[in-house]
Image: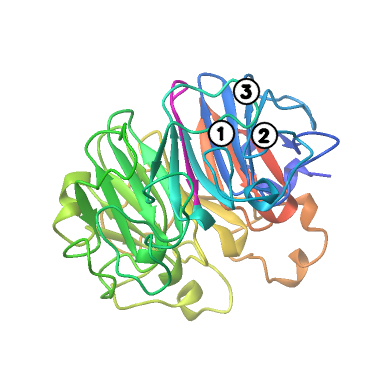
Amino acid sequence: MLDPTTLGPHVENAYEFKGSKAYPFLAPRGICTANGRLFVSDTGRNRVFIWHTLPISEYQEPDVVLGQTEISETGRNSGGSVSGSTLQYPSGIWSNGLKLIVSDAWNHRVLIWHTLPTKNGQPADVVLGQPNFFSNDPNVTGIGAAPTAHTLNWPYGVYSDGTSLWIADTGNRRILYYKNIPTGHFTPADGVIGKPDFKSRDYENKEPIWPYAVKISKDGALIVADTQFYRNLVWHNHQDALHREAHTIIGQRHFEDCGQNQFGLSPSENTLNWTYDAHFYKDGVLVNDTGNSRILWFDQIPTSNNMSATAVIGKKDFRTGSENKDTLMGTTSSLYWPFSITTYGNKLLIADTGNHRIVITDLKI
């Protein structure tokens, strides 16, 4: 049972949501809200759920199930071959209430519904990263194949501003940019972030090493959760990201640094551990510090490297992390490896993956 007091003084009215009572979440990794709707990637069971209204109790049956024809089905690619209706380890998810985009990570593709699905198992309209709905090898031709402007390899994150599309093409260590949300299969990207060209996969420390999520602020700033180097990379203008390194680093002092909690024994107000997401909120940004089972709040988007957070959510103080002795037991009373975050008004929604639930709470910041 969730104890709201363990989340800290910056939230209130916290409660947990576990999905369907008969078939609850298993390791949900993606979450999105739009027009009062809730979208969740139930990653461990290869499903995406849609609720037409934001749940207010511990359990609520979904209105639409994608990836499976029945809520009780959970197999990879619905227990058969890949198709336009199946999912295998869905992760990042985005919707504006009109369209839906899902990163179908283990099928090495991104699926797009140009109108919101209304039926269980409804097939997607468009597939990116693969030439058709029936292929799912990394970079189309298999492990070891070089990437192109058309292909994907373990894409975990997606984001759109309603016009353009960004994909965190994690296995290819890059972010793909589409000027317009594609309407046809296998559409090539218009630009690449983190690489000099579409065919490169080798990396330098100044580039995204393992980009898991990408977000754009209302003013056009771009942030990338660069998981493997325990940092978030920030560009003040997303167009700059196509031709230069990040302006600011959150979680490390320099591009060459890659220490987990900066090699400290405990976290602090400026360190990260396996960061998997970020979310712009008001004039600042929330950073999902997954390995420390907490969320850092910066009241302004950082303008210099290694800035300290304003507040912490999910732990009693900045020095407490997942591996401290007072948090090793009873993790259900707090956060445990949260992968994704979003907001709806002043509400914070957390995909609390290790606890197989969504935490919904009001923000006081």
Residue 220, numbered circle:
none
What is the quadrant of residue 127 in the picture?
top left
**Residue 35 horizontal side relative to residue 29, left or right:** left
Q: Is residue 96 magenta?
A: yes
Of 338 and 199, nearer the camera is: 199
Name the kind of residue labelled 1 in the image: Lys
**Residue beneath label 1, please?**
364
Q: Residue furthest left?
A: 243
The segment highlighted magenta reads 95-104
> Which residue is found at the position 36% from the left and 69% from the top?
209
Residues tagged 1 and 2 counted as in contact (Cβ below 8 A): yes
**Where does residue 43 sit, x and y in percent of width and height?**
63, 49
Q: Is residue 8 magenta?
A: no
Q: Secondary structure at mark 1?
A: loop
Q: Secondary structure at mark 2?
A: strand
**Residue beneath label 3, please?**
119
**Where does residue 120 sit, x and y in percent of width and height?**
65, 28
Mark 2 or 3, closer to the camera:
3
Name the kind of residue labelled 2 in the image: Glu
Q: Is residue 286 among what the camera can see?
A: no
Q: Secondary structure at mark 3?
A: loop
Circle nearer the N terminus (1, 2): 2
**Residue 56 horizontal side relative to residue 146, left or right:** right
Q: Give the CA separation, mark 1 to mark 3.
A: 37 Å
* Magenta span dominant secondary structure: strand
